[in-house]
Image (cartoon, rainbow, N blue to C red):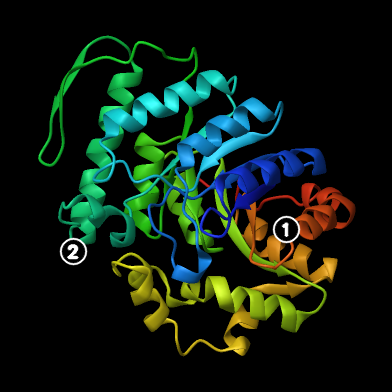
Amino acid sequence: MQIGYKLAAEGFGPKELIRQAVRAEEAGFDFVEISDHFHPWLDNQGHSPFAWTVLGAIAAETDRIGLATGVTCPTLRYHPAIVAQAAATLALVSDGRFTLGVGSGERLNEHIVGLEFPDAVRVRQAMLREALEIIRLLWSGGYQSYQGQYLQLSDARIFDLPDQPPVIAVAAGGESAAKLAAELGDGLFTTEPKPELVEHYHRAGGDGPRYAEVPVAWAPDEHTGAKAAWETSRWALAGWPVMSELPNPKNFAAASATVREEDILEQFTCGTDPERFVSAVKQYTDAGYDHPVLQNAGPDPDGFIEFYRTELADRLHALEPANSKVRA
């Protein structure tokens, strides 16, 4: 079991994110994960630094803790060749501690380069497949070219490659993406405790790590936690079909205007009761996920990290994921 800490790149500037990652390592977290976005979800979050610069600095400031993107879209805002080069370099400077989380993206971040973000999910998944094929091709060494329906590569070579390529964890919300994670990825990445995604992944031959984000809001009491989560994270209650489509933070503000504190309390574990936090993570381990990521929307990151060190670390590491050997 590996327990992660989500770096809220939309809520903090780059130096603060680096500081939190160092604190997370000291507190015993196994890895940190950072979103790779251009915009925050809401304007009042106020930040969205370049994830790769932050990760490089974290690699230099830490010794043990793993690093991951959660997740990078390697199709529009970045060409997959650039992602392949960036991931290879980060794997080298972190001594193999980096995991490349990838997904098909959101309009919020991908439309900014002036390219059309496809309306059809099947097209986004087809583009992600081509991107993964290009990344794998470049990581195999030598000069490579690729001609796909959506993406091309022309006579490209990555000169600095690690002995072992980074783990690729593919984000999935349904069966086809879970199968893609098994076919071209090394792991699975989700945001919901769905056991069927683990089953689809295993039945397609996947046997790698299964990442899942767990929404929490550590605070002195439930109300304070829910209020903080409402202010910065109410967009998450819209669900992925909405989250992937809206183009700007102001649209997310409008779409989430009717979210109530009661709605937040249904989705986020708020307050300071360690039993409730353990139970929240157990939903995910019971569903078969062995890399839960604590995504804290509370107002005090240092207090939460210390809470993890003293109240959660040992208990969460003792949890056992279910369905770890499901096969057809």
In the image, residue 64 lies at what x, y percent?
71, 28
Residue at 47 percent of width and 74 percent of height: 235
State whether residue 260 appears in this view: yes
**Within-10-Å neighbours for mark 1: few <14, some 14–19, many 20+:** some
Q: Earlier in the sequence, mark 2 or mark 1?
A: 2
**In the foreground, 187 or 323:** 187
In the image, residue 27 lies at what x, y percent?
81, 44
Lateral position of residue 247 relative to residue 33, left or right: left
Residue at 44 percent of width and 61 percent of height: 40
The amino acid on which the numbered mark 1 sits, given as a three-letter code, is Pro
Lateral position of residue 168 relative to residue 54, left or right: left
Between disc 2 and disc 1, the foreground one is 1
Residue at 69 percent of width and 29 percent of height: 62
Which residue occupies the extreme right position in the image? 310
The picture quadrant where one finds residue 8 is bottom right
**In the foreground, 145 or 62:** 62
In the image, residue 172 lies at what x, y percent?
41, 54
Q: Is residue 236 above or below residue 178?
A: below
Q: Secondary structure at mark 1?
A: helix
The amino acid on which the numbered mark 2 sits, given as a three-letter code, is Asp
Residues at marks 2 and 1, CA–CA distance in whole angstroms: 37 Å
Residue identifier under label 1: 301
Q: Which of the labelled discs sits on residue 119, or is there none? A: 2
Q: Is residue 110 above or below residue 185?
A: below
Q: Is residue 98 above or below residue 108?
A: above
